[in-house]
Image (spheres, helix red, strand yellow):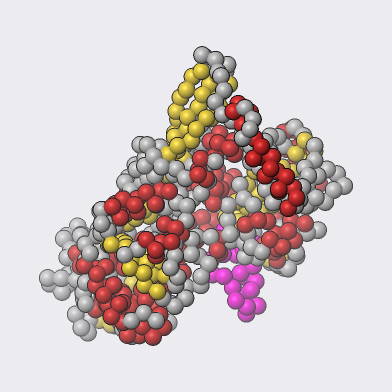
């Protein structure tokens, strides 16, 4: 068969609209109304996780079985979920329509011989023919493992990661493009993660709206104004309980319209406002001192290194050091414990947030992280921020003091927003403020998900026992996880063929040429175009991308610019394009081989995810 994509003209649209209007005159059974059924109908309910957006709401799937045929008849929010609490948006309910869409890709297809990519001419084949085509093309064109690139969207990141990454690494494929990372949520959330230690960017940190009494939104309309049912139901509960809501935004957004106070700010100056807030909290000592001493690195001693940069003043074994509050003695404490309560010998520790003036270790003056932070932002006062933000200094003072004094404040972690150059540091400062008031893993603050807690507990226990924590994909959470993954794809020694990911090879090439280079181009498409077009050289040889497999992603539509991806997919060096999808997306016409994908409701892989502001887990099941 071959696909044709007709153009929708104004005349055709009006004709189809008239036809739809006429359907109201037909019998109900012809338009999806109730029809007579036999008595032998079995109704049951199973539970799953919605895959229509990254909110990942918990779903109740109602099915009916008649004459041995089971069909979904209704999707609802899972009433037992503490995440979305039985609620579900219209988009989520459309999941049933996706399952039974008449345009579903029902079997493998191969591009018709003689046609070009983009013309959408395909013929149906068997699975055996599809696999044989891929194998023959790989063999006859001598496509090497490092010449393959895997492309996936956020769906792949969340639902396929446990299979996709091992598949790539075991086949010697170092190249993975995971969504349009530069302008997805990554750059914003990595700012948060660099403070909290998380990595999973889809709600591994959950704001406990229900129990918060002060909620601050900064450059963030998406969390509430966008379609995120799991956030909206929790936010609505906070409003019912009387939480004060403040929105810092350049416009009267949907979120700002629901706030108790809208602070209008000049575009691009949110970071100035937040740093000034942090200046007030630190210099007026409005922080939660006990939390900082026990659960953060604020009491750790710092010193300048040879380049003048701050570095932890560790002992000879790499352990951080603190000053005992009562005695002034400098002691070493275990790293990565999140509990600064004992020294490396097991004795009690009471860390001081301020080191004595003139303290010197190994010939270098030292101070605590807190003292260094105050020194670094000494000039960033509300008076300074007022000049750039357009917000009066007294408003910044008041906001900082109200936030710190609220008792259970939240600065929302943010959703999207990664389209701005200051977003990484903005989200980082927000996370620092949340930590300063002790609002991490505490009622009315930021709650770490159950999945994160399970994995961190396992990792910490393995470190203490000096053993491996287990498989990377299922046993390691947060920054250690992404660190190991980056190490794998950036190190040429990981694979027998000796090639790192082309993104790292390209960054090294640009750096060597004196041009601007990306420091950690993991999972991004930086360098892909150069690899496809033959402009990337590694160890004196061209590093080409000659084959691409795209799973659950639509880069021609969603990755910018679309012309770049059309060029990539139709370039003469591109020998093979495999697309795995549920429906004929904008990218599908550019495939050589199309493989059908089941919808999220038809899959039964054991994907687990957080089940709300608690440490429970949600699990997918198959209807």
Q: Could you tell whether 129 is left or right of 442 in the image?
A: right
- Magenta-drawn stretch contains 505: yes
- Magenta-drawn stretch contains 285: no
Residue extending furthest toward the left: 326
Answer yes or no: is residue 136 visible.
Answer: no
Number of marks in the rendered image:
0
For image coordinates 77% across by 42% down, the residue present is 3
Split into 4 quadrants, where in the image is the N terminus? top right
Position of 525 relative to 37 (above/below) = below
Residue extending furthest toward the right: 114
Position of 422 relative to 39 (above/below) = below
For image coordinates 21% across by 62% down, the residue present is 407
Near-viewer residue (289 or 480) = 289
Q: Position of residue 613 (x, y in %)?
A: 33, 48
Near-viewer residue (350 or 36) = 36
Q: Could you tell whether 545 is left or right of 179 in the image?
A: right
Position of 304 relative to 206 (above/below) = below
Near-viewer residue (463 or 15) = 15
For image coordinates 55% across by 48% down, the residue present is 155
Residue extending furthest toward the front: 25
Q: Position of residue 356 (x, y in %)?
A: 19, 80
Magenta residues? 500-523
Choose top left, top right, bottom left or bottom right for residue 344: bottom left
Answer yes or no: is residue 210 visible.
Answer: yes
For image coordinates 54% across by 15% down, the residue present is 38
Q: Position of residue 242 (x, y in %)?
A: 25, 57
């Amino acid at each position: 068969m071959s696909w044709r994509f007709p153009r929708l003209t104004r005349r055709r649209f009006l004709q189809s609209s008239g036809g739809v209007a006429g359907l109201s005159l037909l019998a109900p059974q012809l338009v999806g109304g109730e029809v007579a059924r036999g008595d032998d109908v079995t109704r049951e309910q199973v539970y799953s996780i919605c895959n229509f957006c990254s909110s990942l709401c918990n779903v109740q799937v109602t099915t009916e079985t008649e004459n041995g045929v089971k069909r979904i008849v209704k999707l609802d929010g899972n009433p037992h979920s503490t995440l979305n609490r039985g609620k579900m948006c219209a988009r989520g309910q459309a999941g049933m329509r996706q399952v039974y869409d008449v345009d579903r890709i029902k079997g493998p297809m191969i591009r018709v011989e003689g046609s070009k990519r983009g013309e959408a001419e395909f013929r149906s084949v068997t699975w055996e023919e599809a696999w044989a085509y891929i194998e023959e093309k790989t063999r006859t064109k001598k496509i090497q493992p490092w010449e393959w690139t895997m492309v996936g969207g956020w769906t792949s990141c969340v639902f396929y990661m446990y299979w996709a990454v091992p598949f790539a690494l075991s086949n010697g494929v170092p190249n993975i493009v995971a969504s349009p990372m530069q302008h997805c949520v990554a750059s914003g959330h990595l700012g948060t993660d660099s403070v909290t230690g998380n990595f999973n960017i889809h709600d591994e940190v959950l704001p406990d709206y229900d129990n918060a009494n002060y909620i601050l939104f900064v450059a963030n309309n998406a969390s509430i104004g966008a379609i995120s049912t799991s956030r909206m139901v929790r936010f609505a509960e906070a409003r019912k309980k009387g939480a004060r809501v403040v929105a810092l935004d350049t416009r009267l957004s949907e979120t700002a319209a629901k706030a108790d106070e809208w602070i209008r700010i000049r575009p691009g100056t949110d970071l100035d406002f937040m740093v000034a807030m942090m200046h007030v909290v630190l210099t007026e000592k409005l922080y939660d001192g006990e939390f900082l001493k026990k659960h953060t690195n604020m009491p750790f001693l710092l010193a300048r290194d040879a380049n003048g940069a701050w570095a932890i003043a560790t002992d000879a074994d790499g352990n951080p050091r603190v000053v005992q509050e009562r005695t002034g003695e400098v002691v070493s404490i275990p790293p990565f414990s999140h509990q600064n309560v004992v020294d490396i010998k097991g004795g009690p520790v009471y860390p001081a947030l301020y080191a004595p003036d003139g303290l010197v270790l190994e010939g270098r003056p030292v101070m605590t992280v807190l003292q260094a932070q105050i020194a670094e932002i000494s000039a960033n006062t509300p008076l300074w921020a007022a000049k750039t933000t357009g917000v009066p200094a007294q408003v910044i003072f008041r906001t900082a003091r109200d936030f710190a004094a609220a008792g259970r404040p939240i600065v929302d972690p943010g959703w999207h927003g990664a389209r701005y150059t200051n977003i990484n540091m903005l989200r980082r400062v927000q996370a620092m403020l949340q930590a300063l008031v002790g609002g991490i893993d505490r009622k009315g603050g930021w709650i770490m998900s159950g999945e994160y807690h399970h994995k961190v507990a396992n990792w910490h226990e393995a470190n203490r026992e000096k053993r491996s924590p287990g498989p990377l994909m299922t046993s390691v959470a947060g920054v250690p996880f992404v660190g190991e993954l980056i190490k794998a794809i950036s190190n040429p020694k990981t694979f027998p063929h000796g090639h790192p990911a082309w993104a790292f090879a390209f960054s090294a090439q640009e750096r060597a040429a004196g041009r601007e280079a990306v420091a950690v181009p993991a999972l991004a498409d930086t360098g892909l175009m150069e690899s496809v077009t033959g402009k990337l050289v590694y160890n004196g040889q061209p590093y080409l991308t000659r084959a691409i497999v795209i799973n659950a992603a639509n880069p021609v539509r969603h990755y910018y610019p679309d012309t770049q991806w059309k060029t990539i997919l139709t370039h003469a060096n591109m020998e093979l394009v495999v697309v795995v999808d549920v429906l004929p997306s904008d990218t599908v016409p550019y495939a050589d081989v199309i493989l059908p994908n089941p919808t999220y409701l038809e899959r039964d892989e054991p994907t687990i995810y957080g089940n709300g502001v608690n440490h429970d887990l949600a699990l997918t099941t198959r209807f």
